[in-house]
Image: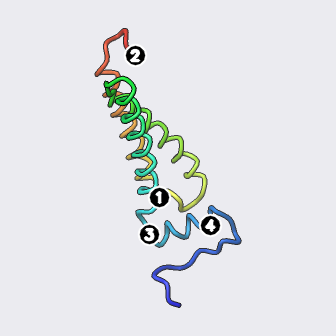
């Protein structure tokens, strides 16, 4: 059977599967990280709206961005898993969302 990409060897560990898939599909890891960010952001926004009918979008954006940064940092330890450019984009998004959070609030709210 012909495959569109090289099938990863599952006997060598999960990191080899992720690196092989990332080598074949270059947008794989950024899309996984975006999916995780979206799940954290949307679940926080919808849960807060359901409980208090008020949504603190900057807070959930910052929380999701920091979580993605914490997920992406260990990925740099495995060669070929995440590119430096994507890590820089994640850090910039985290800084921007943090600035948005602190500029959106009064001194007593943060």
Give the residue drawn at x 60%, y 52%: 77
- Crowd class of label 4 (few under 14; some 14 to 19; many from 20; radius 10 Å): some
First in sequence: mark 1 vs mark 4: 4
Task: Determine whether, in the image, residue 84 is placed left or right of residue 57.
Answer: right
Tell which residue pokes out farthest to the right in this image.
Answer: 11
State if disc 2 and disc 1 touch (CB < 8 Å): no
Q: CA distance from mark 2 to mark 4?
A: 42 Å
Task: Determine whether, in the image, residue 71 is placed left or right of residue 54.
Answer: right
Dot 1 corresponds to which residue? 29
Dot 4 corresponds to which residue? 16
State if disc 3 and disc 4 touch (CB < 8 Å): no
Task: Determine whether, in the image, residue 58 is placed left or right of residue 72.
Answer: left
Q: CA distance from mark 4 to mark 3?
A: 14 Å
Instruction: Give the image location of residue 46, x and y in percent.
Output: 37, 36
Q: CA distance from mark 1 to mark 3?
A: 9 Å
Tell which residue pokes out farthest to the top in this image.
Answer: 108
Q: Which mark is residue 25?
A: 3
| SS at circle 1 | helix
Which quarter of the figure has residue 13? bottom right
First in sequence: mark 2 vs mark 4: 4
Foreground residue among 41 and 92? 41
- Crowd class of label 2 (few under 14; some 14 to 19; many from 20; radius 10 Å): few
């Amino acid at each position: 059977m012909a495959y569109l990409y090289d099938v990863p060897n599952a006997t060598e560990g999960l990191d080899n599967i992720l690196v092989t898939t990332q080598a074949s599909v270059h947008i794989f890891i950024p899309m996984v990280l975006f999916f995780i960010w979206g799940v954290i952001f949307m679940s926080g926004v919808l849960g807060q709206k359901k409980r208090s009918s008020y949504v603190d979008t900057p807070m959930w954006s910052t929380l999701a961005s920091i979580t993605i940064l914490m997920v992406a940092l260990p990925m740099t330890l495995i060669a070929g898993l995440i590119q430096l450019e994507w890590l820089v984009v994640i850090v910039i998004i985290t800084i921007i969302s943090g600035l948005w959070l602190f500029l959106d609030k009064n001194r007593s709210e943060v």
